[in-house]
Image (tube, helix red, strand yellow):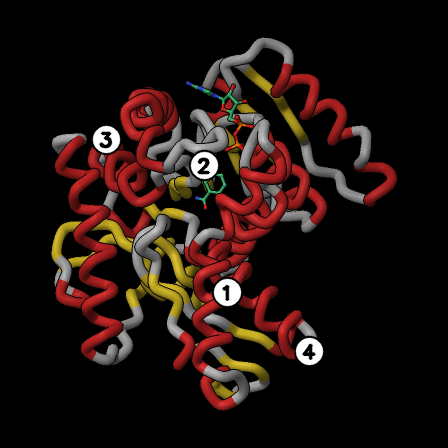
Amino acid sequence: MPARPKITVVGAGNVGASVAQYAVEKNLGDVVLVDVVEGIPQGKALDLAQAGPIHGYDARLVGSNGYDETADSDIVVITAGLARKPGMTRDDLLFKNAEIVGSVVDQVVARSRNAILILVTNPLDAMVQLAWKKSGFPPQRVVGMAGILDSARFRTFIAWELGVSVENVHAFVLGGHGDTMVPLPRYSTVAGIPITELLPPARIAELVKRTASGGAEIVGLLKSGSAYYAPAASTVEMVEAILRDKKKILPCAAYLDGQYGVRGLYVGVPVKLGRAGVEQVIEITLTPEEQAAFDRSAAAVRELVTTLKL
Ligand code: TXD
């Protein structure tokens, strides 16, 4: 029997712990949880292991404050950092989280030279760019989670609006993870029918607006933290697509080398995710307005990356 895949999750907070939970519930592999806070990763790992007999998983779960246990990971999910507080933008987090993510990447890559890194920490697009630079990994093996979450939010709102199953709804969101994200109604469908055929433009605009501020809506409700169930589920969809070599087309923050007119920058686009990581960036034709919105979003990401001198 080959060994189970090894998934490291750095940051055992709200998102990290839920990633660990969903990953073992889906039998994706063994999980190492790492955090700076003493006892938290160990306690959560032990607690999750004890849910195994009930859920029927045999995954090994280990918690640690160090990185030795992470050696030879297949996938490393990085959620370490600070989450947004009410009134804070994702960009306020920039410098603090850059410091945290930079040190985490150093520790991780020293022990897992062949891993695929999935970044979750905000501001997402800039953190992926930083992780890619720091790791020295090819861009195929460094990818960020955001578009799946943004499109899951859009899908939820569309399904509610039309009273149909969420399974029938596919949505398309491009661009950076932030206020400039670009939901594409033309490519968002219900059982294959574009929503532009099903809903009036004004109503679509409202759903788009709620999607773009979907994270802030939850921060406003929770007050003491930001969303984590849907972010973790989105991350685990990426982990599964990679480990099971599904070649799944998913919107992720990926390195662009000329696609969509952008070079040398991580931005959210549809990609094919498989065992090699980002196996292809899928390019679709945009209208001039969509391209302009995408350009604005990429410019906002570029600004952060320049601020960080990456
Ligand atoms: O779409 C997306 N990409 C996102 C991003 C969706 C949701 C959350 N998003 C961002 O993920 C959020 O803005 C944060 O930057 C991260 C993690 O969010 P989470 O809600 O999990 O935050 P927590 O609960 O505060 O957990 C962060 C953990 C916490 O336990 C800290 O002790 C730990 O990170 N931490 C560290 N771990 C390891 N190493 C270092 N240096 C470190 N510093 C803090």
Q: What residue is disc 4 on?
A: 164
Establish if 58 lies above or below 235. above
Going from N to C along the chain, the mark reached first, 4 or 3, is 3
Residue at 62 percent of width and 32 percent of height: 17
Establish if 180 lies above or below 195. above
The 10 Å Cα crowd at callout 3, few under 14, some 14 to 19, many 20 or more, is some
Q: What residue is disc 2 on?
A: 76
Establish if 246 lies above or below 240. below
User: Residue 142 occupies which quadrant of the picture?
Assistant: top left
For discs 4 and 3, the disc positioned in front in the rendered view:
4
Mark 1 residue's CB less than 8 Å from ligand 1: no
Q: What residue is disc 1 on?
A: 246
Q: CA distance from mark 4 to mark 1?
A: 27 Å
For discs 2 and 4, the disc positioned in front in the rendered view:
4
Going from N to C along the chain, the mark reached first, 3 or 1, is 3
The percent coordinates of residue 88 (x first, y second) are: 40, 32
Mark 4 residue's CB less than 8 Å from ligand 1: no
The amino acid sitting under disc 2 is Val
The amino acid sitting under disc 4 is Val
The amino acid sitting under disc 3 is Lys
User: Residue 13 occupies which quadrant of the picture?
Assistant: top right
In contact (CB < 8 Å): disc 4 and disc 3: no
Q: CA distance from mark 3 to mark 2?
A: 14 Å
- Viewed as shown, does residue 47 lie left or right of 237? right
In contact (CB < 8 Å): disc 3 and disc 2: no
For discs 3 and 1, the disc positioned in front in the rendered view:
3
Residue at 37 percent of width and 37 percent of height: 90
Check residue 134 in the rendering and tell me which mark sits there, or answer none: 3
Going from N to C along the chain, the mark reached first, 4 or 1, is 4
